[in-house]
Every structure is written in C-alpha cells, then in structure tokens.
Amino acid sequence: MNGHQLILGKLDDLITGDTIDDTHDERYRQKIAGLLINRKGYLRHDIEPRRKLMVRAGEKRAIIKIDFVIRLENRMGMIINYAPGSLVTRHRPLVAASRILAPYQIPVAVVTNGEDADILDGPSAEISARGLESIPSKTDLSAVVSNFDFRPVPAPRAEMESRILYCFEVDDSCPCDTDICRI
C-alpha cells in the first residue's frame, strides 16, 4: 500500500513512457491519456501529465497535481483532472485551478471519473458539454485557443482561487494522500 492506493504492480505511462505504480486510479488516467492520443488527435508532447501546482491559503501552502495540461500554440488550452465519484463536487476546484495554473485564464477545464466527464468553460465555469467523447479534440481546442482572449487573472482573484483550491484539495483530503505535499 502507498498512501490510500492499492499498488497492483507497475505500468508504463502512455505519455512519458515512465514506469509508474499501477493503481485503480492510474488505470483510469491511462484510459484518459489513450483517449487523448488515440481518438482526440493530441501528440504526446501536447500533454503534460502530473503538473505540480502550488496552492496557498494565508500562510498554509501545499503542492497538488493536475492530471493533464494540454498546450497548443504555446498556451495552456485545457486542463483535465481525474477523481473517482461525483463530478459536480469537482467543478469548483478545477475552475479555480484553471485560474491559477497559468498567469491567464485557461479556456477549458475537464473533470472526469474515467467513465463520464463534464467539460467546463473556464471563464464562466458553465458546463459546455458532457461525456468522455465530448472532450475537445486537438482541432476543436485549437479553434478555441486561437479565438480566446488570454486575459491575466487579477492578483486578488488568483489569491481567492488559490484559497478555494486549497480548501477543496488539501483541507478536504485524506491525511494519507501521497499526491499532496503539505509545506
């Protein structure tokens, strides 16, 4: 056992080729990676897996991970996070992440449990589509990115978004979660 995950062995990460722990959650992440590469047209270098993100709430700090960051035209165009269970409870923290991961608002945020997905418009936090098949393809995301106004997120707003993300992802996490590094 590693934290709260049952280690089933090892597997090769589809994006990086690295050997990583085989867990039930990682199998879903690899399924999503396969969807992005094999059916949505992304190249491996378009996708950054396990992106670390520092979050703060006052003096408290922690590093969390965003499962997938998709870059097109030298911009972060989409983030995807996997979590088991209900999708609706994952909307707000993922939108917060879309507002602090880059110095600008990331246009698309996707939350998935590996079986279903909600695709969120970053600026409005509204659901724009549902279902794994509705995750934007590279062509679709390229159109979004080329027409998007990559406005900077104001510092006070970014601070509040970081607090929100900290509350959802760190304060509400299992103490044995090894994906979170409390600093």
Image (cartoon, rainbow, N blue to C red):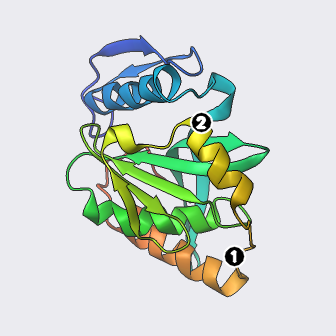
Mark 2: which secondary structure?
helix
Spot occupied by residue 140 in the image (x, y as percentages of width and height): 57, 43
Q: Quadrant of residue 10?
A: top left
Residue drawn at 49 percent across, 75 percent down:
124
Against 133, residue 58 (above or below) is: below
Q: Nearer the viewer, residue 141 or 159?
A: 141
Can you identify the residue that label 2 sits on?
A: 138
Residue shown at the point (60%, 20%) measured from the top left:
16
Q: Amino acid at mark 2?
A: Lys
CA distance for labels 2 and 1: 25 Å
Q: Is residue 170 visible?
A: no
Label 2, residues with CA under 10 Å away: few <14, some 14-19, many ≥20: many
**From what the image shows, is residue 129 above or below residue 134?**
below
Residue 153 - label? 1
Residue, x 44% and y 22% (percent of image)? 34
Residue 131's spot in the image, x, y percent?
Answer: 30, 45
Horizontal side of residue 120 vs 48, given as left or right: left
Report x, y in % for residue 36: 49, 30
Q: Does label 2 or label 1 sit earlier along the sequence?
A: 2
Q: Quadrant of residue 155?
A: bottom right
Looking at the image, which residue sits at the far bottom? 156
Number of numbered discs visible in the structure rendering: 2
Where does the N terminus fall, quadrant-wise? top left
Q: Give whichever of 52, 110 is nearer the camera.
A: 110
- Tell me the amino acid under the disc marked 1: Val
Residue 182, given in percent of the width and then of the height, sits at 50, 58
The answer, for residue 146, to whether it is visible in the render is: yes
Q: Tell me if 177 is positioned left or right of 139 in this view.
A: left
Q: Which mark is residue 133?
A: none
Please give left or right for residue 144 compared with residue 7 in the image: right
Q: Residue at x 32, y 30 (%)?
A: 28
